[in-house]
Amino acid sequence: MAVLLSEIQWGDPVLPAAHDVEWEAELKRRGAQVLEVDRRVAPSRWLREAAYEATSYVPGALTERLHRMGNMVTAQENSCRYCYGANRAYMKVLGYSESFIQQVERDVQTAELDDKERAYIAFCRSLARSRPRPAAAERAALLKLGYTPAQIGEIAFAISLGCFYNRVSTLLACPSEQKFERMASGPFRWLLALAMPLMKKFAPSRPAEAAMDQTALAAGPFGVVVAPLAGLRAGRVMKAALDGAFETGVLSRSAKVLMFAVVARTLGCPHCEAAATQLLFEEGLSQTEIESALATLRCPRLAQREAGLLAWARDTVYYEPSSIQQKTRALGAVLDADALLEAIGVASLANGTVRLAMLLE
C-alpha cells in the first residue's frame, strides 16, 4: 500500500529561501501563489520556470479532475510530504470529500470512479513507482479503454513532471504550505474555493504558443524522449526544461549527462541511456569510460567536488525522504549552494525524463 501523509518523515530545509523580488512579482503577475519551492529554486532560471509549470500546467487533453487526482497519487507514491499535502488540500478546496480522497489514496475501489478512471489511477501509480516502468502493454490497455494517444502522452508528461517536482521538493526538504493546508481543512475553505478560480480568471492571459512538431522537439538534449509530445504544450515545457538544464551552469556538462545516464541505468531505460551515451561521446568520453562510470559511480574526468554526484543521483531514484535529505545535506558540504541547487534540479529532471521515455516502449 502507498505511504500515507502522516507516515512521511521530513527533515529541516536543505537550502534557505531566497527572496527574489523580481521573480516573486512575476509569479504574482501570472496569477500564481509564491510557494516555498519557488523561493528556494529562484536562483536557477530554468529550474524555477520548470517548477512553476509543474504547479500551473493546465492540461489540454485531460480533465482537471483526472489531472488533480494524478498529481496527488504521484506525490503519494514518491513520498513527497510537501506536494502530497498541497495536492490533497487542493482537492478538498475543489470540493472532493475527505472520504473520497482517503479511498483514492488508500487505493480502494469507490463507486465515484468508473473503470476508466480506476485504470488511470493505477497507471499513475505504476509510472510514478516505476518498479518497473510501465511498458507497451500498459499503454495499449489505456488505448483499449478509450484514452487517445494525445491523452496518454499528457498523462505520462504530467506524472513525469510530478516526479520531477516531487524530488525537487523532497531533496530541498521544503517546509509544507501549512497555512494553505489548514485553510483547506477548516470551516472557511469555501473562501478558497471562490478565490482560486477568480485568481485564474483575472490573471493576465499567457501569449498563445504554437505546439511544436516532432522535428523541433527532437532537437536538443534527450529530444528523442520529448518528440512523442508533439502537438501538446507539454512538449514545449519539457524541452525548455531540458535545454535549460544543459546550458552552461556551475556543474560540468559531463557530470549532468552522467547523472542522467545513472538514472536511466537504474530504471532500466535503454532509450535515455543511449541518448546520454551519445552526449557523452560529444564530451569526449569513450565507451569504456562511460561503462566504468555507470558500473562504479565514479568518473576521473569529473572535478573533485563532483565526485559524489553519481552515487547520489542513483539514490534519488528510490529513497526514503529523511535519508535522501541527509545525503543531500552531505553533498552540500562539498558543493556550494548554487551547485547543490543545480544538482537537485538535474537529478529531479533526470527522474522525470526517464519516466516520460515509457512513451517510446
Image: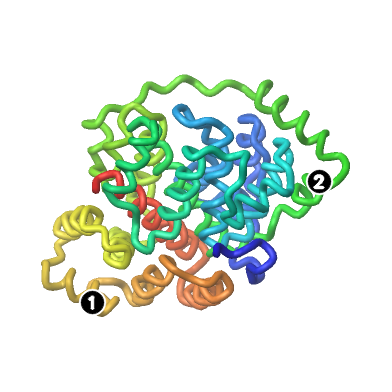
Residue assigned mark 1? 295
- The disc label shown at residue 191, or none: none
Kindly identify the amino acid type of the residue bearing the numbered disc 2: Met
Q: Is residue 252 visible?
A: no
| Left or right for 142, reference 186 | left
State the residue in front, 213 or 106. Answer: 106
Kindly identify the amino acid type of the residue bearing the numbered disc 1: Ala
Q: Residue lying furthest right in this view?
A: 187
Tag 1 secondary structure: helix
> Residue at (53%, 55%) from the top-left corner?
166
Which quadrant is home to the N terminus? bottom right
> Residue at (21%, 31%) from the top-left corner?
215
Are there few (<14), some (14-19), or many (20+) residues within 10 Å of tag 1?
Answer: few
Looking at the image, tell me whether mark 1 or mark 2 is earlier in sequence order.
Answer: 2
Residue 63, image x, y percentages: 53, 30
State the residue in front, 60 or 171. Answer: 60
- The disc label shown at residue 183, or none: 2
Residue 302, image x, y percentages: 28, 71
- Check contact, mark 1 vs mark 2: CB within 8 A: no
- Would you place residue 270 above or below residue 155 in this image? below
**Which of the 4 image quadrants contains residue 13?**
bottom right
**Which of the 4 image quadrants contains residue 251?**
bottom left
| Left or right for 250, reference 272 | right
Q: Residue lying furthest front in this view?
A: 111
Residue 282, image x, y percentages: 15, 55
Residue 67, image x, y percentages: 53, 38
